[in-house]
Amino acid sequence: MDKSIILQQLKRREEARDEEDSWREWYCLTPLERWHESMKLWEFYLRVGGALDPEPDHQSPFDAFLPRGSAPAYGRSGLRVLRRGRV
């Protein structure tokens, strides 16, 4: 292994000693392992009904342009086609 990788792992383990036990395992993981664990959490979040839609921000200047109300139950945008022919 490369010396810099070993030093990074040792540094991570030292940091883990200072943190709580729940964080210790996380600090000992490599960045790639952390990425895979994060993806597992996202998959679970979406499976239990989590949404990636942002929370409404009523102080945003763009808030007036966002539609009010909940999203349609079938998951589409809620817009309908007004014309099917050529313009």
Image (spheres, helix red, strand yellow):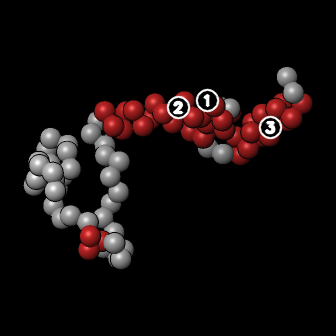
Residue type, label 1: Glu
Question: Is 30 left, or right, of 76 in this rendering?
Answer: right
Q: Quadrant of the C terminus?
A: bottom left
- Residue at screen point 53% across, 31% down: 37
Q: Can residue 51 be seen in this view?
A: yes
Mark toward the start of the polypeptide (1 vs 3)? 3
* Residue 39 placement (x, y as % from top left): 48, 33
Q: Is residue 48 left or right of residue 71?
A: right
At horizontal 36% and vertical 38% (from top left) the residue drawn is 45
Q: How crowded is mark 2: few (under 14 residues within 10 Å), some or many (20 or more)?
A: few
Going by the numbered disc 2, the residue's amino acid type is Glu
Q: Do the residues labelled 2 and 1 touch (CB within 8 Å)?
A: yes
Q: Can residue 21 be seen in this view?
A: no
In the shown orientation, is residue 68 left or right of residue 28?
Answer: left
Q: Mark 2 points at which residue?
A: 37
Give how far apart the Cα atoms at labels 1 and 3 are.
14 Å
Determine whether label 2 and label 3 are within 8 Å by CB: no
| Residue topped by disc 3 | 8
At x 19% / y 45%, what residue is drawn?
A: 76
Would you place residue 63 above or below residue 24 in this image? below
Residue 49, image quadrant: top left
Of residues 79 and 43, the one nearer the viewer is 79
* Disc 2 to disc 3, C-alpha distance: 19 Å
Q: Mark 1 points at which residue?
A: 33
The tag earlier along the polypeptide, 2 or 3, is 3
Q: Which one is in front, 29 or 13?
A: 29
